[in-house]
Image (tube, grey):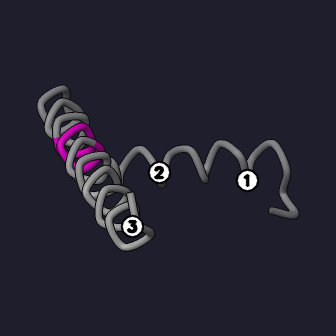
Amino acid sequence: MDQLSQMHQELARLEFVNDQLQSERAYIHDLLCAIGFPEGLKTIAAIANEVLSEEDPQR
């Protein structure tokens, strides 16, 4: 297999992995919204940052 073919194969693999990760992210976001986090992942990230800053005020 030549280098160009290997690069195309790796690109296809990475696109597949990216699609899977995007689907998982969307699913988790929707679940979080469904259980009461109004902006899903954004809300969770804000809460996590708040908790961390309470533990380490210099953060």
Bounds of the magenta span? Answer: 21-26
Residue 9 lies, in percent from the top left, at 31, 56
Pointer 1 residue = 53
- Which of the two discs, 3 and 1, labels the residue nearer the N terminus? 3
Which of the 4 image quadrants contains residue 51?
top right
Element at badge 3? helix
Pointer 3 residue = 7
Q: Give the amino acid type for the residue marked by disc 1 in the picture.
A: Ser
Q: Which residue is at a point 38% across and 57% down the rendered structure image?
A: 1
- Which of the two discs, 1 and 2, labels the residue nearer the N terminus? 2
Q: Which residue is at a point 12% across and 31% down the rendered structure image?
A: 34
Q: What distance separates the C-alpha of mark 1 from that of mark 2?
A: 12 Å
Give the numbered dot on residue 45. 2
Residue situated in front as seen by the camera: 51 or 14: 14
Q: Give the amino acid type for the residue marked by disc 2 in the picture.
A: Ala
Residue situated in front as seen by the camera: 31 or 47: 31
Which of the 4 image quadrants contains residue 10?
bottom left
Element at badge 1? helix
State left or right for residue 50 relative to residue 59. left
